[in-house]
Structure formats: C-alpha cells, structure tokens
Amino acid sequence: MPTPPKRPKSLLREYVDTALYAVILTLLLRVFVVQAFRIPSESMVPTLLVGDFLFVNKFEYGPKLPFTHVRLPGITHPKLGDVIVFQYPQDPSRDYIKRCVATGGQTVEVKDKALYVEGKKRDEPFVIHGDAMVQPAAFGPRDYFGPFTVPPGNLFMMGDNRDNSNDSRFWGPVDFDLVRGRAMFIYWSWDGDRNWPRFQRLFKAIR
C-alpha cells in the first residue's frame, strides 16, 4: 500500500517553528556563551560608565548549568586585570562587575590607597581616586586593608573607581562558583545626563 504524501506545513506553522527555534537558540547562547549586562553604578569609572551596555563571555571560564553548581570546563581561568561579572556574595540575586586584583593563594594589601599583590605594588593606569584624603585604617578598609590571603577557589575584586566602590575590601572575596563571566565589549552606551548615545564608546573592548 503506497505511503500517503506528507501534508506541507502551513505558513503559520512555519512561522511558529522558526520563532521557537530562535527562542531556544537565544536561551542556549545566553546560558552557555554570552549574556548582556548594564552598568548601573560609577564603581568602574573610567573603564565603564553608567549607561554602558556590554556583553559578558560565559564560555571562557566555563558556563554553569542552570539551577546547579556544576560548571562546564572553560578554556582559561580568571587572571589579574580581568573585568568580571559575578553574583554579589551577600545577595546572589544581584550581579556586580569589578576587576580581579588577586586570585586564590595570593596575598593582597592596600596601603595609602596603593594596591600590593604578593608584596609588590601594582601598576594600575585604569584606576582613579576621587578623594584626595587618605582615610586612616580606623575609618575602614578603603585606603588601608590587609594583608589578606585569598582562599583557594576565590577572587579578590575591586572597582576601578577606588574611592567609590563597594568591593572585596568591605565584604570579602568572591567564590568562583558565583562568577558569571568576563566582560568583553560595550555594544551600546547611553548618556542619561544628555539623553544621547555615546557613539564613541560603541564596540569598545573592555580591558
């Protein structure tokens, strides 16, 4: 008995299938490869400005499987100088972005606003200090901190706007399990004060 010919898909069914495939592909890319992120604060000025929109590379360090603590193998590990998006340790529902200044096993110290890693002063041309006053250690860890040895599997994160950054000096290191990925480049930037795009920042690599 001959097999009856297959009925062609309707135009509506083709549109629905295409949209479904696109949604699935977008979700897979977001979970395993790249995710968009918006800069909400001034803690990373001048590297990142409020209103910058950027892409985060999740594949580089290895993406996490959703709703688990299982991380797939990555191609590299976080290193000093990487700008990283991570879940805030005190509230993992919030994402933060800072610069990695020390990794597990390294000793970090801040003296008179200057950063020292393994006893050596770091050259940080991307850092700014908006407050000329140096606060004594008794006032808090902003300008004097440590020495502190970062636990294995953790990162010490600090903002480039050192005098206006809530970072590891105040709430401790970041467990690698909380890392989302490395910031890659700015795909859009909006100046809220001028209500105008910052065209000169588009597609700018983040270093």
Image (cartoon, rainbow, N blue to C red):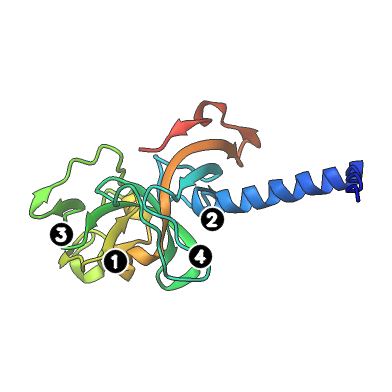
- According to the picture, the residue beneath numbered tag 3 turns out to be 106
- According to the picture, the residue beneath numbered tag 2 turns out to be 31
For the residue pair 106 and 194, the one nearer the viewer reads as 106
- According to the picture, the residue beneath numbered tag 1 turns out to be 173
Cα–Cα gap, marks 3 and 1: 12 Å
Cα–Cα gap, marks 2 and 1: 24 Å
> In the image, what residue type sits under mark 1?
Pro
Q: Are marks 2 and 3 in contact (CB under 8 Å)?
A: no
Query: Nearer the observer, disc 2 or disc 1?
Result: 2
Callout 3 environment at 10 Å: few (<14), some (14 to 19), or many (20+)?
some
Callout 2 environment at 10 Å: few (<14), some (14 to 19), or many (20+)?
some
Marking on residue 76: none
Sequence-first disc among 3 and 4: 4
Sequence-first disc among 2 and 3: 2
> In the image, what residue type sits under mark 2?
Val
Residue 78 lies, in percent from the top left, at: 29, 51
Sequence-first disc among 4 and 1: 4
Callout 4 environment at 10 Å: few (<14), some (14 to 19), or many (20+)?
few
Picture quarter with the C terminus: top left
- According to the picture, the residue beneath numbered tag 4 turns out to be 94
Q: Are marks 2 and 1 in contact (CB under 8 Å)?
A: no
Which residue, as the protein is rendered here, is positioned at the far front? Answer: 1
Query: Nearer the observer, disc 2 or disc 4?
Result: 2
